[in-house]
Structure formats: C-alpha cells, structure tokens
Image: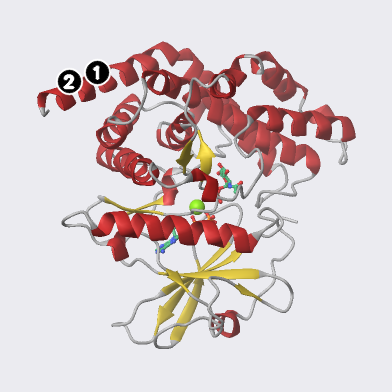
Amino acid sequence: MNNEEKKAYNIFEIASNFCIEGNIETIVPHGSGHINDTFYLKNTNVALPGYLLQRINHHVFENVPALMANVQLVTGHLKKKLALVAGSNPDKEVLTIVLAKDGQCFFCDAEGNYWRMYCFLKDTKSYDLVLTEQQAYEGGKAFGKFQLLLADLDAGLIYETIKGFHDITVRLDSLNKIVLADPENRVKDVLPELTFVMERSQEMVTIINLGKEGKLPLRIIHNDTKFNNILLDANDHGQCVIDLDTVMPGYVAYDFGDAIRTIINTASEDEEDLTKIDLSIPLFTAYAQGYFESAGGFLTDTEVKSLSMGVLLIPYMQGVRFLTDYIAGDVYYKTHFAGHNLQRTRAQFQLLRKLEEKYDLLDQVIQNVAETSRQLASETK
Ligand code: ADP
Ligand code: GN1
Ligand code: MG
C-alpha cells in the first residue's frame, strides 16, 4: 500500500479545488516523509504565497475528515494563544489551512484520495540531521512550547487518528502476529532482531505502566517529533511545528524520546554502516536545555524521571515498527530499496545499544538541566 501509487497526479487540477490566491507556476515534490506525499506549489506572482499540497495516506489514517478536524482544532487553539503573546506572529508560527472551495479543510478526488493544503512558510528549513547545538536547542524550545500551549486544550475533543500509536504493548502484539503469519517468508532473516526485541520487552512497558497506574499524566503531545517536523527560520530559530497528523494524548516522554532519536544520532535513521551510528552528547544537552526552558514549568517530578526512559523506548518502538513492516512485506512506510525497512530496523537497534551504554550519563544530563531550570524559576519568582 505504501509504494503503490507512484503515479503522476494532476496536481494543477487538484490544486484548483482549493481557495488559492494567484496562479500556480510550478509543482515540486517536497520533503522526505515516510507516509504522506507532499508538493510545493510556487505562485506565478512572487508577492503571493506559495502553497504546500499533501496527499494524506488514507491507509494509515483511516478517518481523514476527523484527522483534519483535529488539525483545525489544534492550529486554531495555537493561533488564539499566540495572538495574546507580544511579538508573536501566529501566521508564521502556526500552520494555516487553505480551505477547499466547498468550505471543507480537505478535498477528496474521484479516486478517493484525500488532499489538504497549507500556506507555504517561506524562508524556512527542516533538517533530517541536526548540525548545530543551536538547532537542537531551538528544537527543544519549539516542541516544549508546543506542549505548553496545548496544555489547556480539552483532550476529549481530539480524535485518536491511529489507535494505540505509541502503546508499546500494541506494537509488540502486532509484531508477534506478523511473525506468526510470516506472509513473505522473511522471519528466517530476522532472528537476531527478534531476540533483541524479546530481551527488552519487559523493561519497555515501564512508561505505559506508570501511565496506567496514574503516575504519569496524559497530555496532548505531538507524537511525531522527528527533527524535520520543525521549521527553522533563516537564522535557525524555531519557527513552526508541523506534521500535526498524530497530535493526540500521550506521555511527554514519547515526544522527548522521538526528538532525541533523531537529534542525538550522528548518522541517518536508516544508516547502512552501523559503525557510523554514534551519540552526540552536546546536541542532546542542547535539546534538553531548550525543552526545559519551555516545558520545565509544568513537568511533574515523575515526568522528568520518565524522559530518559522515553529516550530508550522510542528507538526501540521505532525498530519494532520497522521490523513489523519488513516482515509484513513493506506495506506501511515508503521504502526506497529492497530491505530498506530491515536496514532501518538495524540502525534503530544499533542506536538503542549506544543509548543503553550511555543511559546513566543521559539521565544525569536531564536531571542537571531540570535542576538548573528549577533554580532559575525560583530565582525569577
Ligand atoms: P510528512 O508527514 O510526509 O513527514 P510533513 O507535513 O512533515 O509531511 O511535510 C514534509 C516536509 O515539507 C517537511 O519536512 C517540511 O520540510 C516541508 N513543509 C511542511 N509543511 C510546510 C509549510 N507549511 N511550509 C514550508 N514547508 C513545509
Ligand atoms: C513516519 O510521516 P513521517 O515521516 O514524519 C511515522 C512516524 C515515525 C517516522 C519514522 C504516521 O513519520 O511515526 O516515527 O515515520 N508517522 C506515522 O521516520 O506512522
Ligand atoms: Mg514530517
């Protein structure tokens, strides 16, 4: 399902169903996401905005109208809150949905594909790999602020776009089921990876169990805090958090862990040469500093303690998800070559080995940053 529709869409025709200003001059495939298809639409009149058109993967997101209602709710809330903050610019700092001509926030074409459009935020960049401490720090600030601004939004209004999205017990169940079915006869190739998963399955339920015991609050979180889901401005300051499809209730450690997964790794998410995978502690520290600057004020002590567990959990869960998809026959993530999902799995598990080796240090950094943030807060009271 993931790679099925590598066909050319009539993007001009699709775009004509949205309320755009001016005319579209060129259309360029954009970004490196694994789920949706994204196109940048340049305006003939440079004074007018460009647009970002996305085909939403409706195999992954089964109820697109409900998903878009979430995006509308979340962006509306963020814009309202930012409008009250001096010096903020909600148009630049929050995604703006461009409505379809029938007034809906998506357009469904004759083949049943769902499309949405956002205003293109010009002079911004997103990074697959983080290069500087400033970028990492800005990322932490942006994702922390995102959680902070959504803290007073009623979670009951949010539709769960993918059930059990970050529930590790659900992910392990899916893996077990696909191992039993083994539809492509691939299980024989992944026995070391399956052993790796089993060896850690007990410890990885800690966060979800703390949540079930009522010790961790459910908050509205982003749930896909890959670093490339933040747009930085021309000066590398965090401008806008994007990719809002999975904004749902969850535990803050999930967002922290997912961001760190992409920030701390000196290599790509799917690095083939495992010897290139290493940790950058300065980038980790910078992200934690930025994050606590925004979120330090609302985190409970148990949440602070849970962050380092999230740093292990999310690469583990990501590896489990890539492995499940490999065994299933590559039906979920876009893949670019045979064995891509297995290569991704191995890279995530190698990253996890490195994180495990440095766990005590990483936890210490978080506790130090938390302490400094507490001291600063009490001094400014
Ligand atoms: P995916 O779900 O496929 O990851 P994203 O919504 O993250 O899709 O968009 C893919 C890429 O497009 C992003 O990494 C970013 O580079 C770019 N992008 C997304 N939204 C905008 C926007 N409103 N303005 C400018 N660039 C954007
Ligand atoms: C997918 O859409 P994208 O590429 O931002 C996935 C995330 C994974 C990520 C791994 C809806 O995100 O959960 O962490 O790939 N999104 C969904 O790179 O499954
Ligand atoms: Mg994305």
Residue 32, how many percent across, how many down?
52, 55
Q: Report which residue position mark 2 lands on.
A: 375
Q: Which SS class for mark 2?
A: helix
Report crowding for label 2: few under 14, some 14 to 19, many 20 or more residues within 10 A (C-alpha). few
Residue 277, how many percent across, how many down?
49, 29
Q: Report whether the residue tagged 2 is closer than 8 Å to ligand 2.
A: no
Q: Report which residue position mark 1 lands on.
A: 371
Q: Looking at the image, which residue is at 41% across and 59% down? A: 75
Q: CA distance from mark 2 to mark 1?
A: 6 Å
Residue 204, how many percent across, how many down?
60, 20
Question: Can I make out residue 155 in this image?
Answer: yes
Q: Nearer the viewer, residue 114 or 187?
A: 114
Residue sticking out furthest to the top:
360
Q: Mark 2 touching mark 1, by CB under 8 A?
A: yes
In the image, residue 61 above or below residue 148: below
Q: Nearer the viewer, residue 314 or 149?
A: 149
Q: Quadrant of the N terminus?
A: bottom right
Q: Looking at the image, which residue is at 64% across and 46% down? A: 162
State how the image is colored: secondary structure
Q: Looking at the image, which residue is at 56% across and 32% down? A: 273
In the image, residue 17 above or below residue 195: below
Residue type, label 1: Glu
